[in-house]
Amino acid sequence: MVGTLFGLGIGPGDPELITVKAFRKLKESPVIAYPKKQKGSKSYAQRIIDVYFLPNEKELLGLVFPMTKDQNLLGRKWSETVEKVWEKLQEGKDVAFVTEGDPLLYSTFIHMMRLMQERHPEVPIEVVPGISSINGAASRLGIPLADGDEHVAIVPARDDYETMKKVIEDNDCVIFIKVAKVIDLMLKVLRELDLLHKASVITKVTSDEEIIWRVEELDGAELEYLTLMVVRK
């Protein structure tokens, strides 16, 4: 019998923000798959779940997802990654693939799920939703994301001034993810719209490494990847 692949959302950073169901699936699954850094340090997702297991209690399957736009390299690495998970599943073992936030919201699990369905359609797949960094940021910052008929947007920040400006103009609240690489452009947009005082920036929300930044001091700053911006007009 083929094992089940679980996509488990394990929250934005605080280990206590894992749902009861995700916790149960973690405990029941003999194999835990997680995104692994190439240099050997623990991944963010791995650190979240570490508090729940004793050493050697689970079979841990670290999966490297290269940060590159080389499609040939990506295709080869993703193929290797899916087959590593398939090896465990065909042994009849359930595999819990953990991801920070929610598995179906800007997550590596989305691609894993699609490729597994394409190559091994006999594999049962279940998804357990998780609390996203967006929800975590709203809570930590005390900012309502939407009320009544207001519009809220979740947008990957990119180097496109006019598009970023229009998104802010067209919505009551915008959550920009992946904002670190274009922080100077975003600050320029906010200043033009006179909305700098309406923006909040937070890194590794709810974790013990969380940083809430003073937005007006971020010009030229080098921020970590897990940083988002909330603009609430």
Image (spheres, grey):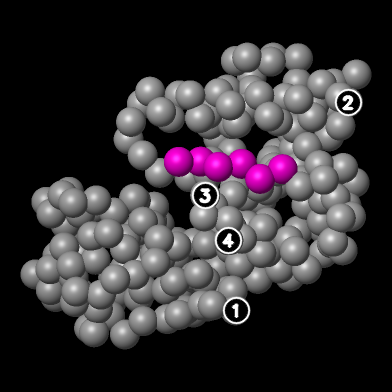
Identify the residue shown where x is 20% and y is 64%.
186
- Quote the CA–CA distance across marks 2 and 3: 28 Å
- Quote the CA–CA distance across marks 4 and 2: 30 Å
Which residue appears farthest toward the left when viewing the image? 192
- Count neighbours of disc 4 (C-alpha within 10 A) and say few if under 14, some if 14 to 19, many if 20 or more: few
Say which amino acid is labelled 4: Ser
- Quote the CA–CA distance across marks 1 and 4: 17 Å
Earlier in the chain: of badge 4 and badge 2, it is 4
Question: What's the mark number on residue 208?
Answer: 1
In this view, the residue in front, 199 or 37, is: 37
- Count neighbours of disc 1 (C-alpha within 10 A) and say few if under 14, some if 14 to 19, many if 20 or more: few
Q: Which residue is mark 4?
A: 41
Q: Position of residue 43 (x, y in %)?
A: 59, 58
In this view, the residue in front, 78 or 146, is: 78
Earlier in the chain: of badge 1 and badge 2, it is 2
User: Can residue 185 be seen by looking at this rendering?
Assistant: yes
Give the residues in magenta. Answer: 61-66
Disc number lying in front (2 or 3): 3
Q: Quadrant of residue 192?
A: bottom left
- Asked whether residue 153 is drawn in magenta, I would say no
In this view, the residue in front, 157 or 53, is: 53
Q: Quadrant of residue 13?
A: bottom right
Q: Position of residue 129 (x, y in %)?
A: 67, 48
- Asked whether residue 65 is drawn in magenta, I would say yes
Say which amino acid is labelled 3: Gln
